[in-house]
Image (cartoon, helix red, strand yellow):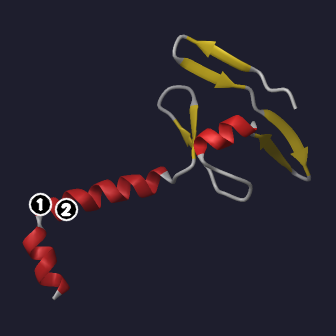
Amino acid sequence: MYTSVYTFGILKMSELKLRKVGNSLTMTVPVHVAERMKVREGDSVYLTELPGEGYRLTPHDPALVEQLKVMDDLMSRYPNTLKALSE
């Protein structure tokens, strides 16, 4: 399948095709994009709405990343308390 790739300076944009499957639309991700994202058939990817206009497609859950950042902050601020709680 032919995929269009557009280059704007350092940014690359790949064209994704939408197809109807039953009552849903599916996106076809080009192999070179899947390889770069390190995803394969059956994996979950996450579509995040960005401020303003636009979306980001990522192979990880952005909400989990935010939770891990909060946890890291708490662990660095309260190491003694967390150690005492674990005993």
> Residue 54, percent across and down?
57, 29
Identify the secondary structure beneath mark 1: helix
Which residue was labeled with disc 1? 77
Query: Quadrant location of residue 57?
Result: top right
* Along the viewing direction, whichever of 60 and 48 lies nearer the viewer: 60
Identify the secondary structure beneath mark 2: helix
> Which amino acid, by three-letter code, is at mark 2?
Leu
Find out whether the residues at labels 2 and 1 contact each other: C-beta distance under 8 Å.
Answer: yes
Which residue was labeled with disc 2? 74
Residue 18 drawn above or below residue 83: above
Query: Quadrant location of residue 74?
Result: bottom left
82 lies left or right of 44: left
Residue count near mark 2 (Cα–Cα under 10 Å), binned few <14, some 14–19, many ≥20? few
> Which amino acid, by three-letter code, is at mark 1?
Arg
Question: Which residue: 66% across, 57% down?
Answer: 43
C-alpha separation, residue under disc 2 versus residue under disc 1? 5 Å
Q: Work out which residue is located at the far left of the displayed protein and give it.
A: 80
66 lies left or right of 32: left
Q: Which mark is residue 51?
A: none
Quarter of the picture holding the N terminus: top right
Residue 77 in view: yes
80 lies left or right of 30: left
> Residue 65, percent across and down?
40, 53
Residue count near mark 1 (Cα–Cα under 10 Å), binned few <14, some 14–19, many ≥20? few
Question: Which residue: 21% across, 56% down?
Answer: 73
Residue 46 in view: no
